[in-house]
Image (cartoon, grey):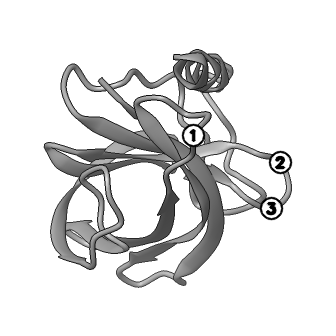
Amino acid sequence: MKALAILSMLVTTAQAAPPPLDGLPLGALPKQALPAKGCAAFLWSATGTRTLVAMVTADPAMLRLSLGGTITDLPRTAQHGDAGFGFSNSTDFGSGDVTATIDMTVAARGDIKDGASVPGGTLRLDRKGQDGVVLPVVGLIGCT
């Protein structure tokens, strides 16, 4: 429960209309809520300013990003490996000209109830006709 309170506090500190992150096409996500049922991974940039850049939900399986100031939900297209809590070690998402891959390590910890940590991972973003971006991420998983 303590971890969920910390997660809630961290998620609520995101800005509502964020600028792009360190010159990247990704922006900070505004406040995000845990899903009514299941788990969500909240991922922050691991370099520079710690910014909430992605939320991944297990059911429905989707990735939420802020691209060019617009909140974008991408459905899961493929997954590989079992990281736990309904997530895979590597998951592909995409719609139209935008594809993304989340590679992450999930670590269950005794001090986190109803969730886990994401001590390391990457978010890869590819958009047709534009340069790809790979961003190191860390995070927390919360479950309801």
Task: Compare residues 53 and 39 and report the one nearer the observer.
Answer: 39
Q: Is residue 47 left or right of residue 6?
A: right
Please tell me how crowded label 1 is: few (under 14), some (14-19), or many (20+) other residues with Cα within 10 Å.
few
Distance of label 1 from label 2 (alpha carbons): 28 Å
Please tell me how crowded label 3 is: few (under 14), some (14-19), or many (20+) other residues with Cα within 10 Å.
few
Q: Is residue 109 left or right of residue 74?
A: right
Which label is found at residue 110? 1
| Marks 1 and 2 in Cβ contact (< 8 Å) | no
Is the residue 73 above or below the residue 47 in the image?
above
| Marks 3 and 2 in Cβ contact (< 8 Å) | no
In terms of secondary structure, where does tag 1 sit? loop
Residue position for label 3: 47
In terms of secondary structure, where does tag 2 sit? loop
Give the percent coordinates (x, y) of residue 32.
44, 25
Which comes sooner in the sequence, label 3 or label 1?
A: 3
Task: Compare residues 81 and 111 and report the one nearer the observer.
Answer: 111
Figure label count: 3
Task: Compare residues 3 and 42 and report the one nearer the observer.
Answer: 3
Distance of label 3 from label 1 (alpha carbons): 26 Å
| Residue at 80% across, 62% down | 47
Residue 43 visible (yes or no): no
Is the residue 32 above or below the residue 115 in the image?
above
